[in-house]
Amino acid sequence: METLLLTPTEENLLLAARALADGQLVGMPTETVYGLGADALNEAAVRSIFAAKGRPADNPLIVHVPSVEAAEPLCYIDERSRRVMAHFCPGPLTLLLPKKPIVPDVVNAGLPSVAIRIPSHPIARRLLELSGVPVAAPSANTSGKPSPTTARHVYDDLAGKLHSIVDGGECQVGLESTVLDMTREVPTVLRPGGITPDMLLAVLDEVQVADSVLRPLQKGEKALSPGMLYKHYAPKGMLSLVKGERFNVEKLIRRLYAESADMGKTVQVLAFEEHLSGYEGLNVKCIGSLAAPETVAHSLFATLRQADAEGIDVLYSEVLPPEGVGLAVMNRLSRAAGFRTLDADEEANA
Ligand code: AMP
Ligand code: MG
């Protein structure tokens, strides 16, 4: 199949919307990352999402709708969830809600809940309205790779496997939506994102963050959010995170860089804007500002993909405090590194 790259004209959106309603796959921009969409009520179409991505069938999908009204046939929405939706939707927030029978099991891996999101991106919204169907859409990348934040990333991973990709430019947030489980007594963040726990407290008395957010699952531990089980967001090169006091971090990264380079490896440092001067003479890439974690979120996946394109073998990255949007960044970065973290302060004291 030849995949069409579409500019977001009304005519092209109509073409893509018809393809969706017709059971085909469409790549669409959202404010978080690009999604690989299919009609959520069409089982065969949903199955083809899993096939195109190489995604395990036990990893449920998020269903996208243009409004709360359009979500009503799919799930039960209590007063508390309505309050959250009134405040944060449309936006980068996904709610897990008790599902209604109309949602086929293939969408949500047979779980009692379904994940619902109302995106704010105008192109996604128009596409959803024109198609007239709820759209199941995971990130539009090959499973395991960094999520796509441009149409080009989608094309690089999935060309030939989908009907079309609507090009909406760069995604603003750059990380996937916050996943909030509203089926539990205390609403629980299963995946951190652009909507932070502090922001949610504006309309909820209590919010929990699943404690697996910043660590690998233990053997035998059940994943609350199956997607968090798998190795994720990983570049081809070997990425390690280096934590500690700034100058210890610089010193350790400089030493490891030299060792890797001596072995003939192509090495890259991922550093904050504020610290770039500490890596003079090395191949260093700016990952945004430490003072503004949303800038790191915005460019993280594109940076990891760029490293692949440049054939980088070994990467060392600085880390930021897991607070606010920094929690979402560290959740993705830790998984991209397979949880390899080096402690520069320990090294300095050894
Ligand atoms: P992605 O489609 O790549 O954005 O990933 C969607 C995320 O939402 C994954 O981590 C899924 O495991 C999670 N998710 C979706 N639906 C459910 C559900 N019903 N219960 C628990 N987690 C879910
Ligand atoms: Mg994904």
Image: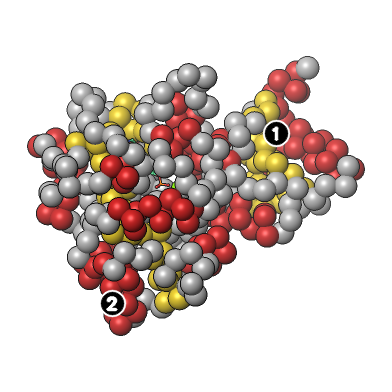
Q: Which mark is residue 61?
A: none
Element assignment for label 2: helix
Question: Is ligand 1 within 8 Å of the beta carbon of the residue shown at mark 2?
Answer: no
Depth check, front residue: 157 or 176: 157
In this view, the residue in front, 42 or 176, is 42
Above or below, 107 relative to 256:
below
* Mark 1 and mark 2: Cα distance apart in space: 52 Å
Q: Amino acid at mark 2?
A: Leu
| Quadrant of the rendered image containing residue 96 | top left
- Taking the image as shown, residue 70 lies to the left or right of residue 200, namely left
With respect to residue 336, does 48 lie above or below?
Answer: below
Residue drawn at 64 percent across, 31 percent down? 340
- Residue 249, labelled with which disc? 1
For mark 1, give the secondary structure: helix
Can see residue 28?
Answer: no
- Pinpoint residue 209: horizontal percent, then vertical percent: 36, 28
Q: Is residue 6 above or below residue 228?
A: below
Residue beneath label 2, please?
Answer: 14
Q: In the figure, residue 112 lies in which quadrant?
A: top left
The residue sitting at 82% across, 36% down in the picture is: 255
Residue 331 at what x, y percent from top left? 49, 36
Nearer to us: label 1 or label 2: 2
Q: Position of residue 260 (x, y in %)?
A: 83, 41
Residue ID at (44%, 66%) = 162
